[in-house]
Structure formats: C-alpha cells, structure tokens
Image (cartoon, rainbow, N blue to C red):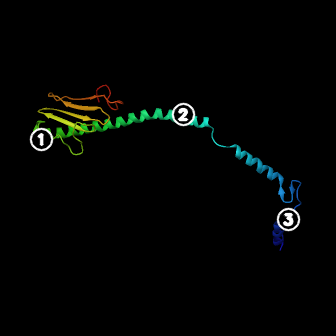
C-alpha cells in the first residue's frame, strides 16, 4: 500500500509546488529570456564569409596544381610500361620463330594480343636475316626500340620526345 501512495505523491508533486518569483501565471521568465538569447545567437550565425570561401578555393587550386602534373607523369609512365611490354612480347615471338628456321626472315610480325602498326599504342617488327628491329610506340609519344645486331648483341633505346617523358631516361631503358 505504501508504494501506491508514494507513486501517487510523485505524480501530484508538480501541482503542489509554490510558484517561484520567476514564474507568473505559468510562464517561466528565466527560461523565456534564455530562449530569446539562443534565438539571437542562431540569427547571428549566418554562414561563411566571402574571404573564408576564397581562401578555401585558393587552397584547393594550389593542391590541384601540385597534383595534376604528378598524375600526368604517372599516366605517361604507365603508357610507356605498356609499350615496353609489347616490345618484349614481340621480341619473344620473333625469337621463337628463329628457333624453328635459324633466320628471322619470314617470321610473322603480327602477334595475337599485340596491336601491330606504327601508330600510338602499336608495335612494329622488321626481321631481316640474322637481325631484327622491334619498335613499340607508346600512347604518350615515346618510341621504344629493341635491336639485335649480327654479332648477337641486343640493344635497347628510346626517344624521349614526349612531355612528360615517362619511362624513357637519357635514351635508354
């Protein structure tokens, strides 16, 4: 029974309180003043100033000018790496043909999976007797050459005409 009586008292307690000085006819003036200050504070916060926005835009611009050349350099390196791989694969094809006939003449210069031609992204092979020249043209503008001489020496060279020059450093690779 006591627990029921305590629960009823807890429910009726707000009605039994005396009004404080700050309360008049159910209005709490302290709370109303605090609400007005909060609203005034919210009205004063209008957003970012023009200077702040310009500073952020300038920072983004500086970061973009630093990152863009690095990205383009990586792209050229990837394109050059693809051309080098195509040149090595074409050499493997020509060397495989040589083991069958002991001459590079008559070796097929079209290999499945390697684009053949003299345009960007293509590879060309020129077999001749006991020598060959394989040239791969990168999409970046560089050309990579693998040349086998009569004495059996294989040389690799490239022309770093593209800007950025990617994977061609001082004429060799």
Mark 1 Cα-neighbour bin, 10 Å: few <14, some 14–19, many ≥20? few
In front: mark 1 or mark 2?
2
In front: mark 1 or mark 3?
3
Query: Which badge, 1 or 3, is on the more N-terminal residue?
Result: 3
Answer with the quarter of the image where residue 136 lies.
Answer: top left
Q: Residue at x 11, y 39 (%)?
A: 106
Disc ID at residue 78:
none
Disc ID at residue 15:
3
Residue 112, compared with residue 4, is above or below; it is above
Q: Residue furthest bottom?
A: 1
Q: Residue at x 27, y 29 (%)?
A: 158
Is the N terminus in the top left, top right, bottom left or bottom right quadrant? Answer: bottom right
Answer with the quarter of the image where residue 103 lies.
Answer: top left
- Label 3 sits on a secondary structure element that is helix
Residue 10, compared with residue 62, is above or below; it is below
Mark 3 Cα-neighbour bin, 10 Å: few <14, some 14–19, many ≥20? few
Is the C terminus in the top left, top right, bottom left or bottom right quadrant? Answer: top left
Answer with the quarter of the image where residue 45 lies.
Answer: top right
Q: Residue furthest top?
A: 170
Residue 159: % across, % down: 28, 28
Disc ID at residue 100:
1
Q: Residue at x 78, y 49 (%)?
A: 34
Marks 1 and 2, how far apart at CA: 65 Å
- Label 1 sits on a secondary structure element that is helix
Residue 15, compared with residue 39, is above or below; it is below
Query: Residue beneath label 2, please?
Result: 58
Would residue 82 appear left or right of 117 to someone viewing this image?
Answer: right
Residue 162: % across, % down: 32, 30
Q: Are marks 1 and 3 in contact (CB under 8 Å)?
A: no
């Amino acid at each position: 029974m006591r627990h029921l009586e305590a629960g009823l008292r807890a429910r009726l307690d707000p009605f039994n309180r005396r009004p404080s000085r700050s309360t008049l006819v159910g209005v709490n003036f302290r709370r109303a003043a605090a609400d007005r200050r909060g609203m005034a504070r919210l009205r004063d916060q209008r957003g970012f100033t023009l200077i702040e926005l310009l500073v952020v835009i300038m920072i983004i611009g500086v970061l973009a000018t630093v990152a863009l050349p690095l990205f383009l350099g990586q792209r050229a390196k990837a394109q050059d790496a693809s051309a080098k791989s195509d040149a090595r694969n074409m050499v493997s094809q020509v060397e495989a043909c040589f083991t069958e006939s002991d001459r590079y003449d008559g070796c097929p210069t079209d290999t499945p999976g390697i684009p053949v031609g003299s345009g960007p992204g293509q590879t060309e092979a020129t077999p001749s007797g006991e020598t060959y020249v394989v040239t791969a043209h990168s999409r970046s503008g560089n050309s990579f050459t693998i040349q086998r001489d009569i004495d059996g020496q294989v040389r690799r060279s490239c022309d770093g005409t593209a800007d950025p020059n990617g994977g061609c450093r001082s004429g060799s690779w």
